[in-house]
Amino acid sequence: APVYIRPGESPNFTMTTPSLFPLRCQVQQYAWGKIGLDSAVAQLSKAGNPDFKLEADKPYAELWMGTHVKAPSMAELNGQVLPLSGVLQKHPELCGNAAAADGSLPYLFKILAVNKTLSIQAHPDKELAARLHKEDPSHYPDPNHKPEMALAITAFEGMCGFRVVEEIAAHLTTVPELKAVVGDAGDAFQQAVASKQDTKAALQSLFTALMKADVGLIKAQLEGLEARLSKVAEQDRDLVTQFVLRLCQQYPGDGGIFCLYLLNIVQLQPGEAMFLGPNVPHAYIAGNCVECMACSDNVVRAGCT
């Protein structure tokens, strides 16, 4: 059986196969993950990690590969199980120009299995991340930014970035429930779009109004919206209507559902990808993907939580 070397201990090994060795990676069991062996995360863990113990009724959301302190990977080398960071620290040549003195990797690689919509979220840029980490390290565990790319390995659905302003303005006209929630900010936004002036500031005010709207008002308007859209024949429901009704079942009364009228809906086929830059609002809705990002776990959350 492999000998485990804990972080801080000196591993006794000589690198004989420097370019390829197995990893034992940790999983995250967030509530939105697919259940048991329906999850690609559980399937991969069961196949490749002898330490993994499956709980058939539990969600398996993410498989992390890297050196992030929240879930660092272990490496199998010459009969020993070693912290990956220790191996990379002893053999920086494995990282080329990305080598760090502490053996950390500058990126984090994940597999995601999404069963239920994640929260509407954004990741801070480097400057904001450093400030948030200093002010609130319990919620922002590292000082790093988190640009990321998601590559679909099944059909994959999500939201990413704001729609063009003309589309949002049109939704404020055709979706009275949204207009009722954002109030005067909706009128100001439509005026800005019509005049083509200060649309960025108006969009910021509109999104802020949605995020800060009264919870009771949101709940009442969503109930009315769901009732109205449910009467539309299935074959006549456009893409946004389909997603709104789905999310109403997952997060009844949550204001994040209105984000479907503000953000782009993205549908990827296997092999297609989307890039999520710093401060770009987004949410994954369903499917399996590979994610690669800067080594960070900083998240600013909005709706669908």
Image (cartoon, rainbow, N blue to C red):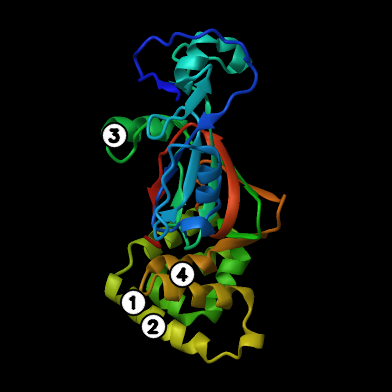
Look at mark 2 in the image and give the residue it sits on: 223
4 up-or-down from 205: above or below? above
**Do the CB atoms of the residues marked 2 and 1 lie less than 8 Å apart?**
yes
Quadrant where the N terminus is found in the figure: top left
Alpha carbons under labels 2 and 1: distance apart: 6 Å
Mark number, residue 13: none
Label 1 or label 3, whichever comes before in sequence order = 3
Amino acid type, callout 3: Pro
Q: Position of residue 200 (x, y in %)?
A: 53, 53
**Do the CB atoms of the residues marked 2 and 3 lie less than 8 Å apart?**
no
Amino acid type, callout 1: Lys
Mark number, residue 137: 3
Q: Quadrant of residue 243?
A: bottom right
Q: Residue at x 34, y 14 (%)?
A: 8
Q: Position of residue 264 (x, y in %)?
A: 60, 61
Look at mark 4 in the image and give the residue it sits on: 258
Give the secondary structure at mark 2. Answer: helix
Label 2 or label 3, whichever comes before in sequence order = 3
Can the viewer see residue 126?
Answer: yes
Label 2 or label 4, whichever comes before in sequence order = 2
Alpha carbons under labels 4 and 3: distance apart: 30 Å
